Each structure stands twice: as structure tokens, then as C-alpha cells.
Image: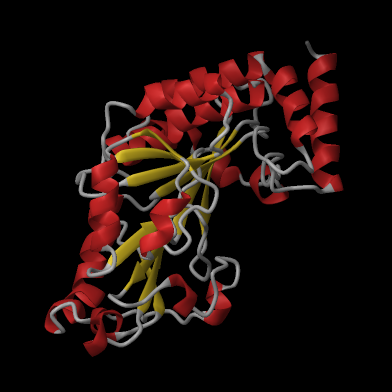
């Protein structure tokens, strides 16, 4: 329960502000959860999102697989929150219009113009071709496009340069040849489905799918390729959190490139002041307060995380992850 509450807290601070403050609300956000989720944890999430009808909380295990298929709705065990009719309308429209699916973990955040940006980019390419064909799948080729970020920001629970910091640390990452999972958006032409893609893994996309090009004319004409999301003046358009609540502990312990970065060591105050709230609608103080709450309950959170390793609910079962969690737990006990 402690780990679950911590993850809910991360969702409240990181994911939720980016969605509810989007410059367009023409989208639905589907949150998938275990149909038998602990009621206390479930009620927390419902209370968080119930003011927003376009945010749906579904008790469902198969996620976004085959959203366009009519039988997709049959896999929903419970609709805990959100406008069910709106969900039905979007699913029906997905078979006759260009469909965009954006992936985001509950502890990550998207920039406030994300939906507007990806919708406009899709409209300029697949959307125009769909209109020319009058949305007739028989007149359209199988076509998809991947939209992803080139720059993203990470917030880490630990600060490698100031051990007693109550803020954690920020670190910017530039991956021009790579698509991170945060904010990864699939665009499907009318009549195209996920199985038509050469790969479903974001780790293999740069190997299996070419870049759309660099010139505007190339990007618009290209098909079945990777395009970078228009970051406008924001640059950092995704923010990922790295905390001990992570199932795989990836990046939670600051890596060498972070520890040795004098550039980012000296950019902390500037980034907190000028980027976090402007880009993601997250007041920095809410992250600082979150960190205090995590710290005060860290022993219980880590105990839960260790107990959850190698179970059906968790994705990981690695000796390295268990070792890191054990080391952190011992350190917390020694300093408590």
C-alpha cells in the first residue's frame, strides 16, 4: 500500500498537471489499472481525476492493444471514472479517422502544448492524405508515423552534487537518434493498425524505422518514418521522474554522466526557475514537497518494492534491481 500511494502521489504531481493544462482538450487520456486494485489506492486516483470527463480510469489488463477493433470494449472490466460515451465515440472514430496514441507512464509529464503539436503535425501529413481519399481506407496505403522527442528532462530523487538537497536534481538529455518511451506517439492512417508496424518496441524503432527527413518538404512527403515533435520554444518537452518507486530502478542511482556534469550542476537553479512550471505546469515547490513525503516514508516504500519484485504485478525480476533496493533500504535504516 505504501508503494502504491507513493506512485499515486507521483502521478498527481507529474502526470496530471501536464494533461489538465493542455492548450487543447480535444483528446482522451486512458489510464489502465488492475480491475482488482486495492480500494484505497483506487479511490485516491478517482478523486484525483473525477473533475475531468476526458480522463478515463479503466479496470483493464490488455491496454491499448487493437483499440480500433470493435471487441476492444469487451475487455473493459470496470469504468472507474470518466465519460464512457466519450470513450465509445473516440473508439468508433478511430476506425474512420487518423488515430494518435501517446504513451506516458504515470510518473512522467508532457509539455503543455503536446496535444496541439502532435495533432497539427499529423494533420499536415497523414491527415491531408486521408482527406484527399475522403477517409476511404480502400484508397489509402498502409501508413504510420512515429512522433517522439529529441530532448527530455529527468528529475532524480537523489542529488549527486549536494547530498543533503531536498530538491533532488534535474538533468537534460539529448537523443537525436533515439525515441524515449515518454510521450512516444503512434499515428495511424485510416485502415492501418499496430500490427502493420515493423516493430512495436521503442528500443528497436531507430533500427527498423527511418527518419522522416530534415527539410519540411521531405517530412511532409515521407511515409512510415520517425518525426520529431515540434518543441517550439520549449526544447524540453517531456520530463521523466527517477525515484525508488520504479519497478526496474533504471536511472534512480545517478549515473557517471550525471555525476560528472558540471554543466547541469550549475544549471539547477535556472532550470527550476525557468523550465519546470513553464513547460509542464508543475510548480517546483510541489516536487520538493513530494520528495519530502517520499523521504519520510521511504523505508516502507522500499520494503513494498522489494516484496513486489518477481510478482505478476511487477515487470522486473532482476538481481541488480533487488540489490539496489536492498542497499537503499539498509542506507535508509542506518540514517533513520
Residue at 28% over, 51% down: 88
Q: Give the left or right position of residue 302, taking residue 137 as reference.
A: right
Q: Nearer the viewer, residue 308 or 104?
A: 308
Residue at 29% over, 48% down: 87
Q: Nearer the viewer, residue 134 or 26?
A: 134
Q: Give the left or right position of residue 111, taking residue 267 as reference.
A: left
Can you tell which quarter of the image residue 194 is in? Answer: bottom left
Q: Is residue 37 visible?
A: yes
The C terminus is located in which quarter?
top right
Residue at 21% over, 63% down: 120
How many numbered discs sit on the rendered protein? 0
Residue at 86% over, 39% down: 323
Q: Nearer the viewer, residue 128 or 329?
A: 128
Q: Position of residue 89 (x, y in %)?
A: 23, 53
Q: Position of residue 95 (x, y in %)?
A: 28, 68
Relative vertical location of residue 285 with respect to residue 180 in this rendering, above or below = above
Amino acid at each position: 500500500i505504501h508503494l502504491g500511494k507513493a506512485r499515486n502521489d507521483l502521478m498527481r504531481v507529474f502526470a496530471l498537471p501536464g494533461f489538465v493544462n493542455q492548450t487543447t482538450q480535444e483528446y482522451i487520456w486512458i489510464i489502465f489499472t488492475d480491475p482488482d486494485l486495492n480500494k484505497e489506492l483506487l479511490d485516491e486516483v478517482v478523486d484525483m481525476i473525477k473533475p475531468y470527463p476526458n480522463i478515463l480510469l479503466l479496470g483493464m489488463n490488455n491496454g491499448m492493444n487493437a483499440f480500433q477493433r470493435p471487441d476492444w470494449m469487451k475487455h473493459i472490466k470496470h469504468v472507474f471514472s470518466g465519460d464512457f460515451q466519450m470513450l465509445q465515440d473516440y473508439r468508433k472514430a478511430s476506425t474512420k479517422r487518423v488515430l494518435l496514441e501517446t504513451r506516458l507512464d504515470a510518473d512522467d509529464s508532457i509539455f503543455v502544448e503536446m496535444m496541439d503539436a502532435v495533432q497539427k503535425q499529423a494533420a499536415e501529413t497523414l491527415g491531408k492524405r486521408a482527406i484527399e481519399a475522403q477517409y476511404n481506407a480502400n484508397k489509402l496505403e498502409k501508413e504510420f508515423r512515429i512522433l517522439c522527442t529529441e530532448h527530455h528532462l529527468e528529475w532524480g530523487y537523489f542529488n549527486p552534487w549536494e547530498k543533503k538537497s531536498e530538491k533532488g536534481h534535474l538533468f537534460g538529455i539529448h537523443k537525436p537518434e533515439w525515441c524515449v518511451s515518454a510521450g512516444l506517439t503512434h499515428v495511424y492512417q485510416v485502415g492501418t493498425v499496430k500490427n502493420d508496424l515493423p516493430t512495436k518496441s521503442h528500443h528497436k524503432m531507430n533500427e527498423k524505422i527511418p527518419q522522416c527527413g530534415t527539410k519540411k518538404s521531405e517530412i511532409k512527403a515521407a511515409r512510415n518514418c520517425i518525426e520529431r515533435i515540434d518543441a517550439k520554444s520549449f526544447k524540453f518537452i517531456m520530463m521523466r521522474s527517477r525515484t525508488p518507486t520504479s519497478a526496474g530502478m533504471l536511472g534512480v542511482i545517478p549515473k557517471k554522466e550525471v555525476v560528472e556534469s558540471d554543466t547541469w550542476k550549475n544549471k539547477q537553479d535556472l532550470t527550476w526557475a525557468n523550465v519546470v512550471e513553464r513547460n509542464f505546469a508543475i510548480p517546483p515547490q510541489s516536487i520538493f514537497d513530494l520528495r519530502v513525503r517520499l523521504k519520510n516514508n521511504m523505508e516502507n516504500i522500499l520494503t513494498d518494492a522489494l516484496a513486489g519484485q518477481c510478482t505478476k504485478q511487477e515487470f522486473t525480476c532482476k538481481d541488480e534491481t533487488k540489490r539496489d533496493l536492498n542497499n537503499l533500504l539498509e542506507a535508509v535504516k542506518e540514517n533513520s
